[in-house]
Amino acid sequence: MVGARTARRARRCTLLILLSLIIGFGSASATPGCDDVLPPPAAGAIGPERDVTTDDLLRLRDVGQPDGAMFGQPTPFAVSPSGGEAAFIISRADPDRNLYCRALVAVGLAGAPARILDRGGEMIINSVVARNLVVANGFPTLLTPVWSPDGRWIAYQRRDQGITQVWRARADGSGAEQVTRSETDVEGLAWSANGKKIVYVTRPERARAARSIDEEGRNGWLYDARFAPEVAPRPLLPGTAAREAFTIDPETGAVVPAIEDERALVPMQDLSGQPIAPAALSASGRRAWTERRDPSPLSPLRLLATDAAGRTVTCRDPRCDGGFTGLWWDGEGREVRFLRREGWANGELGLYRWVPGSAPRRVLLTSDVLLGCTPAGVLLLCTSESAVVPRHLVLVDSANGRLKKVFDPNPEFGAIRLGKVERLRWRNHLGLEAWGDLVLPPDHRSGTRLPMIVVQYHSDGFLRGGTGDENPIHAFAARGFAVLSIERPVFVAARAAGVTSYDDVNAINAKDWAERRSLLSSLVTGVDRAIAAGIADPARIGITGLSDGASTARFALINTDMFAAASISSCCIEPNTVMTYGGIAYADAMRAMGYPPATTPAPDFWRPYSMALNAGRMDRPLLMQLADGEYLLALETFTALREAEQPVEMYVFPGEHHIKWQPAHRRAIYQRNLDWFAFWLQDRVDADPGKAAQYLRWARMRLGADRTASPP
């Protein structure tokens, strides 16, 4: 750390000279429309390769949940009754207008080009129930269209003016129309067996609850467990509202409550955002399913199926021990096909064939990520992606593991130059497996040490921006950084005995900061590997993180001197604010995990984790880019660092949640993280005159940090 600070002082004058020059330079960009929600026919590797930009990553066309680590989610694909086409929703960010271009698309599985059936609608953001309260989390909702039995129509969810309704589009592309006029969001849909009605689910009770809260506010709201002050200054909606099912006749608009057989067609329970235990039913009625091996919610899944006589058969082969992400019967109902994560820290995917009663046989092993797989005739239709190849659609022959590309939403990446990616593997001090993808600049020369940025905490699929997608990995590499994209090890509680609930998991992980120490050990080991390989400059290492990754980053800043700069996307757990701004329900949950109450001084408990208590020595520059629905929890940290005259800067983004979803905000976050680490780790400034004030603030921070730096 001393060497790094000395070097930065020596370069201070150069930086100030650069700052004086940036007023004279600028740049302009065009505002794109939504005409390119599908790639143009000529898109692809035309012309010389160029380096990737933040907008290339931001404007990726997405099919399904964008995060490649979201295993166990529903498929985004609806295969036509004929098996010849698949329909799906495609989405592309438009940061200039701060919206998403969206379309319902159909693509031929035998090679016919993709075509738009409907264009428009707003991004649909997922909500979850946390501590019995409804909280928006910012994740895009994964939507699956549904074909009518006769193949003439496709029904789907579309959001306009803040409400999600059922729409239907003609499969021949001749038009689309809104079907429902629901007061509350439609959360699922299906066609009736005869194709004459659409069954849908919604929550009318939520509208009634919202009106009740508004009415209560006329006399003042009682402050109770309904409040989460960091989310909103009013009671949140209760998470008790059940889904209700209705049917609508698309021709007449007549709506009636669904009967039992119709309710069975739609999801009456909300499983969004949760890994779904794979299960399958053959045409002949044979079942295959997965279940936990023991009562722990972290225990591996095991595979079971019924044989031809209806008896339950358990696969006891080690290749059936956990990691399942998909499960299907073959067309004859004789053989089960399954995908599972396996290998070092589950860093690979294997596709297997299993005849119940015999040993499974693997037909494919890949480090690529396959998501959203669904049967398409005798094949599987999936998305596929790797660390350097964005998501595209493939057909997988589950009999032999062969893959065939069907549709590439982002052919422009064929003309974009990305750096080399090498996977490093290690164990932490507990022996838990972990890995990281080490990304190098495209023009990296062997033997040259680089500033390195750590991105957390999953590294599956195409390397966009880490968990939360705020740190543009390949754009960092294009700017001369090495990037270590880390896959975290399993929970400490996964090895503990007697675990029967997530309350047990949380308590074991929290005791003596066991989970934080495990993750720090893994983090330090991975960084040491990159240093030992001659890649990372130990004096110029930065760290980033959202959520659990932000917690790891803060714990690392307090308990090591490894990092020279940091940027976090959520913050913080501190002695006073966590029990205050989180609200009563959150405080009670934290107390149950072993955290002391706000009124009980416990410096020995908090010192390993509280940046506020350690503010006097937190001299590494810290950038915080936070949602307005979370920033109150950061005020204790920010205030303590500011009063200690430490280099800290905080931004608050309006209308945001745990995952920041607005394209304009995501662009600003991407770019500011690039600027931040370039300034602190490379001594570089952007020549854009609009950033002059930013760099002047940071230069003053550097002068102050040099004066107040803690001794080695």
Image (cartoon, helix red, strand yellow):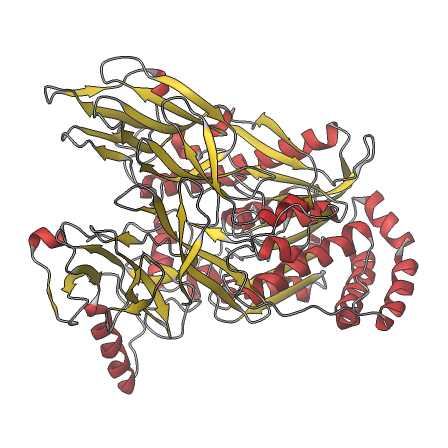
Please indicate, yes or no, whether residue 645 appears anywhere in the rendered image: yes
Vertical placement of residue 599 versus 537, above or below: below
* 60 and 72: which is toward the camera: 60
Please indicate, yes or no, whether residue 613 appears anywhere in the rendered image: no
Say left or right for 687 vs 452.
right
Residue 396 in the image, given as x and y percentages of width and height: 41, 31
Say left or right for 103 vs 360.
right
Residue 609 in the image, given as x and y percentages of width and height: 55, 48
* 188 and 626: which is toward the camera: 188
Residue 598 in the image, given as x and y percentages of width and height: 44, 60
Quarter location, residue 698 = bottom right
Quarter location, residue 520 = top right
- Which quadrant is the C terminus positioned in? top right
Vertical placement of residue 183 versus 293, above or below: below
Q: Residue lying farthest bottom? A: 218
Number of labels in the image equals 0
Quarter location, residue 281 = top left
Say left or right for 481 vs 336.
right
Residue 416 in the image, given as x and y percentages of width and height: 68, 46
